[in-house]
Each structure stands twice: as structure tokens, then as C-alpha cells.
Image (spheres, rainbow, N blue to C red):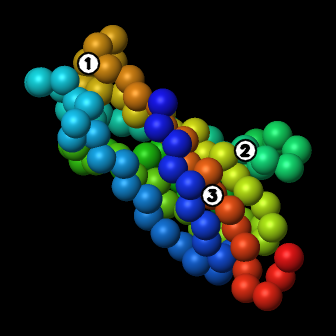
């Protein structure tokens, strides 16, 4: 399991890329991926920070786009990436994303 920690303001929109160059078995490509966001404050699912819950796949990369969010909130985004032969390769990575606008607590 890999966990990345990042921060952004509520107004920013970013694409986060996950590079699987060193973990893809020979002959397997990144076929698809899904993402789900959970608020750290109360554990509720809140996918509104995600532009889409479907990840973009382009071997050896998978990406998600994030936007908005509530200032002061931390989101735990679980990304599940599946290889071209699902039974042979699935990877879960987490993006912990803190939304913090300048000059606010």
C-alpha cells in the first residue's frame, strides 16, 4: 500500500498521477481504476472532491482529478487500479488530501 500526502486550496483543480513503472509485472498494462473519497472528520463518503470516480489509465500511469473541497477538511482518497489481467494485478494507493485556504484555520 502506498500513501501520498498533499494539500490544496478549495479553488484549485489538480490531476494526480500514480506511476506503476516499478510494480507492473511484465506483460500487464494498467487497464482501469476507480477512486472514492472519505472525509477524515466523520468518515463519510464525499466524492464531490473528485471530478470523476473513474481514473484515467495510460500505462504505466493512472490519474485522478480533484477539485473543490471544504477548507479545513482532510480527504482520504482510495484509488484501486486494475491491470489488463485483473486476476494477476490489482494495486491500491491512497491520496490523503488536506484542503486549506490561505488565512483560514
> Residue beneath label 3, please?
97
Q: Quadrant of residue 57?
A: top left
Residue occupying image coordinates x 33% and y 11%: 87
Answer left or right for 18 relative to 104. left
Q: Are marks 3 and 1 in contact (CB under 8 Å)?
A: no
- Mark 3 vs mark 1: in front: 3
> Residue beneath label 1, please?
85
x%, y% of residue 75?
Answer: 70, 52
Residue 56 versus residue 14 in the image, above or below? above
Of the image marks 1 and 2, the number of the one nearer the N terminus: 2
- Label 3, secondary structure: give it: strand
x%, y% of residue 34?
Answer: 49, 38
**Cα separation between marks 3 and 1:** 30 Å
Is disc 3 surrounded by few (<14), some (14 to 19) or many (20+) residues within 10 Å? many
Mark seen at residue 38: 2
x%, y% of residue 62?
Answer: 35, 46
Mark seen at residue 50: none
Q: Is residue 53 visible?
A: no
Q: Is residue 61 visible?
A: yes
Amino acid at each position: 500500500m502506498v500513501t501520498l500526502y498533499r494539500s490544496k486550496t478549495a479553488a484549485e483543480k489538480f490531476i494526480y498521477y500514480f506511476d506503476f513503472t516499478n510494480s507492473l509485472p511484465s506483460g500487464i498494462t494498467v487497464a482501469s481504476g476507480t477512486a472514492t473519497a472519505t472525509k477524515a472528520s466523520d468518515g463519510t463518503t464525499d466524492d464531490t472532491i473528485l471530478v470523476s470516480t473513474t481514473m484515467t489509465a495510460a500505462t504505466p500511469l493512472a490519474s485522478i482529478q480533484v477539485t473543490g473541497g471544504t477548507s479545513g477538511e482532510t480527504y482520504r482518497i482510495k484509488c484501486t487500479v486494475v491491470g489488463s489481467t485483473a486476476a494477476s494485478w490489482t494495486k491500491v494507493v491512497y491520496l490523503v488530501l488536506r484542503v486549506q485556504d490561505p488565512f483560514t484555520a
